[in-house]
Image: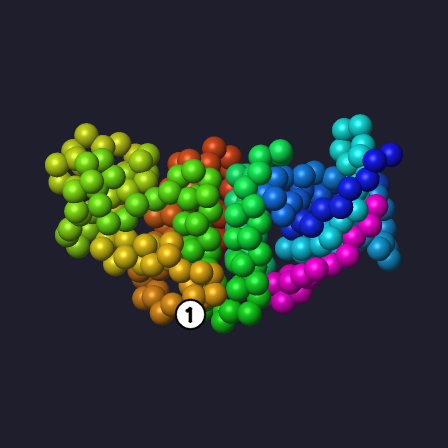
Amino acid sequence: MASYRLRALALKKTKLGETDLIVTLLAADGCQVRAVAKGARKPGSRFGARVEPFVVADLLLSRGRSLDVITDAEIVSGHGAIRSDYDRAQAASVVADVLDKISVECQIDDRLFGLAEATLDAMEGAEEDALLVLVVAFLVKAMAMHGYRPQFNACASCGAPVGGAVSTYSLEVGGPLCEGCEAPARECAHASAAVRGTLASLMRATMAEAAMLQVDRRVLVDAFALMRAFVRYHVHARLKALDLYAADICR
């Protein structure tokens, strides 16, 4: 049976039979891989902790007829601080959920894995108050990598500069609209100049830099709401973790 090695991030796990798991992975090349971890649910399993969500591991897999089988795993980054803290785990769950929905089997985009690692590393060491800004930064960057790069400064329809305290933001084309273009627009939200400026800054920043940004909480919540609407418009799948996170943020 042919074997191969793979560095991957565990995104989620699903029960299979009495003791096995199906693990959804984001490989280092950006492809999604689903593999079986036999006996992972048994007490004392050597795989149990190594295929938990948010863990980056070096894996050895054997080819299977329908799903490949994990035969060995060595942890590279356990991200234990995330898995042991509710707020960090909730923020990281948004990352894993979105990556699960936008990554595709045999579709290479190694930027996704780099973004995932940088985001989880930043979440593990960040202050609790920085978790929301990291979630927002991740959503902006992930959507850009997914082919829906949002714009923030110029009209998404005609390219004219957009001024004013608040502008109409088209979810369809991913950008603000000037007064001349906003009338017939559909599927729109509203974005203040402060929200647009914050999102533009997060697009340019590394995740480590994003964790250090000081952003007014109200502006950040509005930026999250805009990006959540943008993601939900373009990702045609239920994003349970994102919805649960939004419910917590809005309390």
Q: Is residue 30 above or below residue 172?
A: below
Q: Is residue 158 shown left or right of residue 18? A: left
Residue displayed at 28% across by 53% down: 196
Residue 81 position in % (x across, y down) = 63, 67
Q: Is residue 58 shown left or right of residue 121? A: right
The amino acid pointed to by label 1 is Met
Image quarter of residue 149: top left
Residue 66 position in % (x across, y down) = 76, 29
Q: Is residue 228 above or below residue 183?
A: below
- In this view of the protein, which residue sits in the foreground, 104 or 37? 104
Which stretch is magenta? 71-86
Residue 93 position in % (x across, y down) = 57, 52
Q: Is residue 107 above or below residue 248?
A: above
Q: Is residue 248 magenta?
A: no
Callout 1 secondary element: helix
Read off the residue under disc 1.
212
For the N terminus, which image quadrant?
Answer: top right
